[in-house]
Image (spheres, helix red, strand yellow):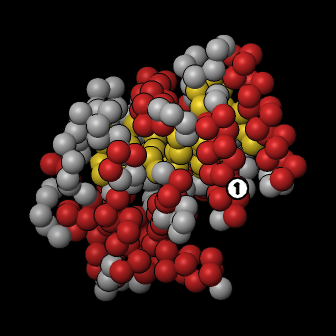
Amino acid sequence: MIDGREDQAAGLRRLFRKAPPTVVAVFSTGHAAAQTAAQAIRRIGSQAHRVLVLDEAAGDASLAGVWGHAPGGDLLHVLDDRQTLEGLLLPVPGLMGRLPIAAVAMALPLLDDERRAQLLTHLQVLQRRTRFMMIHASVQALDPVSPFVFAAPRHLVLAEASGRGATEAYACIKALAAQGAGSLHVAVARARDRADARAFFDRLASLVRTKVGIPLAWVGQVERDDLAEPLLHHAALPQEAEAAFLRRLHGWRHGIAAAHG
């Protein structure tokens, strides 16, 4: 744990000593967004193993219904000692599990230093046990941006190959770009075949390049391709990027100031 009495920099150095997992914020679009997100995450689990889902989407947008989880429970309750971390982690076949974080994402700017340190310690414990940490978010998390999405070094948009999917994917990418997300990863779902998926991506990438001015990185077709490999090896310095996740969460108050200053 981080001792509140010790030098903050020393505490953070100790917290980030172990190489952390790949952290990706995932946004799904289209008529079956939750089902597409679940399929993509399960596919990454089969390819990369030990995937933990931090689900900050609320209500019908969450993955609770897809995976048969009862509503209720949140990482915030662990900070209040109402639940244990192990008791809150919900089972998902083939994955490490699903952890609801919608409430703690909203409350994070209001947490005192002790609870903020406690949150980071819990996340660091989870990171030691997983290879991929997937933050399942909704487009609504971008207005305003959630701290977990802000802190994630990678962003994956699952674009359904439909008119609705294209419209929602473009809006999501535009909002992420406005938050300084840089290049974004895109996987295409529900296309007729790989050629149709690639053609859909090329049209979306061209539109984004012209109107938004950022590149999109092709990940593949959700139903057929290895989605883990492009996410693991896209960044030149992945360990540094992933280590930044908890640091950015820790400094979220400064992130708000920077975003609105």
Q: Nearer the viewer, residue 254 or 176?
A: 176
Asked whether, in this view, residue 188 is left or right of residue 71, the answer is: right
Report the residue at 56% width, 31% height from top.
228
Whether residue 232 is visible, yes or no, is no
Asked whether 79 or 50 is in front, the reply is 79
The answer to whether 97 is drawn above or below residue 103 in the figure is above
Looking at the picture, does residue 229 appear above or below residue 22? above
Amino acid type shown at disc 1: Lys
Residue 120 vertical placement versus 58 (above, below): below
Q: Is residue 198 left or right of residue 187?
A: right
| Residue found at the very far right of the displayed protein | 210
In this view of the protein, can residue 155 be seen by the observer?
Answer: yes
Residue lying at 41% horizontally and 77% vertically, measured from the top left: 109
Asked which secondary structure carries label 1, the reply is: helix
Q: Residue at x 46, y 40 (%)?
A: 132
Label 1 crowd bin: few (<14), some (14–19), many (20+), radius 10 Å: some
Q: Position of residue 157 (x, y in %)?
A: 60, 42
Q: Identify the residue at horizontal 65%, vertical 59% (top origin).
A: 175
Q: Nearer the viewer, residue 9 or 134?
A: 134
Q: Where residue 256 sits in the image (x, y, percent)? A: 55, 78
Q: Is residue 106 left or right of residue 48?
A: left
Pinpoint residue 3: horizontal percent, then vertical percent. Answer: 30, 77
Look at mark 1 in the image and give the residue it sits on: 174
Of residues 181 and 248, the one nearer the viewer is: 181
Q: Quadrant of the N terminus?
A: bottom left
